[in-house]
Amino acid sequence: MDPDDFLLPRSRTANERLHAMIPGGAHTYAKGDDQYPEHLAPVISHGHGAHVWDVDGNRYVEYGSGLRSVSLGHAHPRVLEAVRRQLDRGSNFVRPSIVEAEAAECFLATVPTAEMVKFAKNGSDVTTAAVRLARAVTGRPRVAICSDHPFFSVDDWFIGTTPMSAGVPAAVTELTVAFPYGDLAATEELLTRYRDEVACLVLEPAGAAEPPPGYLAGLRGLADRHGCVLVFDEMITGFRWSEAGAQGLYGVLPDLSTFGKALGNGFAVSALAGRRDLMEHGGLRHSGDRVFLLSTTHGAETHSLAAAMAVQTTYAEEGVTARLHALGERLAAGVRDAAAGAGVGDHVVVRGRASNLVFATLDENRQPSQQYRTLFLRRLLAGGVLAPSFVVSSALGEADIDHTVEVVARACAVYRKALDAADPTPWLGGRPVKPVFRRFA
């Protein structure tokens, strides 16, 4: 279907309702309608497996489900069965539930590099808890974050470093410094410049590219020599790289690590895990100053913990991580062939680990372009593919991927026309999509 004929009247009305009551029209900035072509931001009615339906009745093959959280597909039967059993038994109590012990045992068996775990509801909270704990045990004020990774937390220590820093005191932002991924020399120079001031190194252990040989082990050595805490943000790498995350795949042990997203298959659960001697500072069995680590009313909601246990069991018994990689490899090969066949192989570029694929849209000068992204997304949406990324779920079938590749091929043919014209404007249908982090709306 031509995007000009692809109309979403009910979604447009629903978006107006959302904006009237919810700042930004969504509860996550990455889900905002500014991330989609104008008037082509579908509002979802429901989902099943790898498909979602919008309120206009259109069905899509969906990628990046729930911002990478729904890795088993929507309404997964094993997860739903576990949740239903718990719902009949109550969801929250005035004292810990035995489910908390069971969930902790399950998690620590899945991530054997960790010795203790504490659950919460979102990734920001557990990553900020890791930072607070690192500051407490080291007595140091500064946080060193990897500058190549886009997001760590909604809290001031990170958001103050982005273009959306309004409301964050400069004094807070000044305590956060940055190091480049893969560059041990630059990181050591940073730690030397702020000698005895850096409490922790915070990074995603892997991302769009594999870690350079020896990099993570070298970072482990730098943290040890400079007396700072090594924190792996495994929100994305957890389960998608291996059941135990990147630390399990690459064999490098962080002091603390944070998990979320795929852990609950869409149910709200995250985890802070790490060394017992560090984690106990947030408990009742140590003699030092107490650390207010995590204290959340809903952190131990039983149905979310039941979902997490079901997810971990499913991954282990059904080889989900391997399936994610196989599906991603098939998709990446198909998209690359389609792009090359249309003469845009240097402009529509698939990147990342097979289980975590993203795509770049480059202009005639091979520079990232929001305009060309808009053109590409419009064609995908009109073809029944909802793909802010190409991150797969295990619910995808080969037919879904084949359909996606066909739609990509048609999009790439239009992409070629825009490149030949050196102007994608006629194919945008309105304003271009926008980056999430920007100073003005």
Image (cartoon, helix red, strand yellow):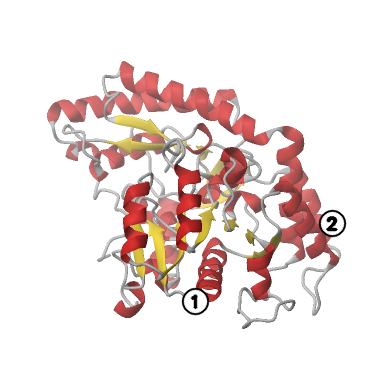
Residue 294 position, x and y percent, is: 62, 73
Task: Tell me where residue 337 sits by quadrant.
Answer: top left
Residue 309 position, x and y percent, is: 76, 51
Tag in front: 2 or 1: 1
Circles 2 and 1, Cβ within 8 Å, touching? The answer is no
- Looking at the image, residue 107 sits to the left or right of residue 326; the answer is right
Q: Which mark is residue 185?
A: none
Residue that label 2 marks:
85
- Looking at the image, residue 367 sits to the left or right of residue 113; the answer is left
Q: Which of the pair 86/382 is nearer the observer?
A: 86
Residue at the spot 56% in from the left edge and 71% down from the top edge: 133
Q: Residues within 10 Å of mark 1 (few under 14, many from 20)?
A: few
Residue that label 1 marks:
139
The answer to whether 118 is drawn above or below residue 68 in the figure is below
The answer to whether 3 is drawn above or below residue 202 in the figure is above
The amino acid at mark 1 is: Gly
Q: Which of the pair 158/423 is nearer the observer?
A: 158
Q: Quadrant of the N terminus?
A: top left
Element type at mark 2: helix
Residue 354 position, x and y percent, is: 50, 32
Quick check: can you spot residue 270? no
The answer to whether 9 is drawn above or below residue 200 in the figure is above
- Mark 2 and mark 1: Cα distance apart in space: 45 Å
The answer to whether 374 is drawn above or below residue 83 in the figure is above
Q: Which of the pair 297/225 is nearer the observer?
A: 225
The amino acid at mark 2 is: Arg
Mark 2 vs mark 1: which is more N-terminal?
2
Quick check: can you spot residue 415? yes
Task: Tell me where residue 296 sits by quadrant.
Answer: bottom right
Q: Residues within 10 Å of mark 2 (few under 14, many from 20)?
A: few
Residue 10 position, x and y percent, is: 45, 53
Q: Quadrant of the C terminus?
A: bottom left
